[in-house]
Amino acid sequence: MKSILSTKKLTLAQKELLLNSGLTFVEYNAISIEFMTFEAPKVIENAIFTSKNGVRAVFNTSEEMPETQNCFCVGEKTKALLEDNGQKVIKTTDYGVELAEYLTKNHKNHTFYFFCGNKRLDTIPEALKEANIALSEIETYKTELNPIKFDRQFDGILFFSPSGVQSFISGNKLKNSIAFCIGTTTAAEAEKHTENVVIANSTSVESVIAKAVKTLKK
C-alpha cells in the first residue's frame, strides 16, 4: 500500500479524502505560526493579505483591529476568511505575482499596507516599489520551522509552502518521493531538491490531496 506524508495537519474532511483512497498517510505540522503584537493606523484604505495567517493575526488575535476599507488578497480561502470577518475584498488572485501585476496596473496612485509574516516573499514589495506605489509592511506573525526526521520513505509528500519544504529538507531527503505542491512558488523550492515535482490544479489543500491520490493510484 502506497503512503503519503502531509507536512500540514489536515481537517477531518481532508483526511477522509485520503482514507477513502486506500492510501496510508502520516501528518505533522512542518511549520508553526506565532502571532506578534504590531502597530497599525486605525483606518487603512487599502490592505494586502497573502495568507490566512495574516488575516487571523489582524482580525482574530489583535486587541486593536484596524478598520480596513478595501482588501486585496492571495487565495480563495484567504478571501473567505476576510469576508467572514466582514471585510470587503476587491481583488483575489492565486499567486502574489498576479496580485502585484494587478495592483501596479490598476492602483498606481494608491497607498497600501501589507500585513505579512517574517518569511514573506519579495514579489509584491519589489513590484510596488518599482512602480513607485507607496507600501508599508506590517509584520504580524512569525513562521518557525518544525523539523522532524523520518526513518522511512513515503511515496508522496504534500507540501503547502516553501517553508514547509525547507523544514522537511532540513532533516530528510526526498529521494524517490514525489513532491506534491500547492503552487508554483512551493514547487520552485521543492525543485531545488528533486525532479519529482507535481503541482496541484488549484491552490487549495484539497487539490493537492486530489492530485496525490490520482497520481499514486495509477
Image (spheres, helix red, strand yellow):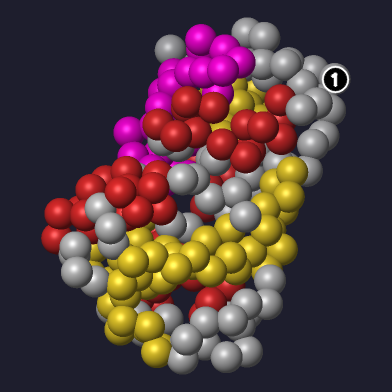
Please provide percent x and percent y for residue 42.
Answer: 46, 91
Identify which residue is drawn at 63% across, 44% down. Answer: 8
Identify which residue is drawn at 21% across, 54% down. Answer: 104
Q: Quadrant of the C terminus?
A: top left
Q: In this view, does 174 lie to the left or right of 203?
A: right
> Residue type at mark 1?
Asp
Please provide percent x and percent y for residue 31.
Answer: 70, 47
Identify which residue is drawn at 39% across, 47% down. Answer: 126
Q: Is residue 91 magenta?
A: no
Please provide percent x and percent y for residue 171.
Answer: 80, 26
Which of the two residues, 215 or 201, is positioned nearer the viewer here? 201
Please provide percent x and percent y for residue 168.
Answer: 71, 30
Which of the two residues, 8 or 23, is positioned nearer the viewer here? 8
Image height of 11 relative to 79, above or below: above
Please tell me whether mark 1 sits on a helix, a strand or a loop.
Answer: loop
Read off the residue under disc 1. Answer: 151
> Which contiguous range is marked in magenta?
190-216
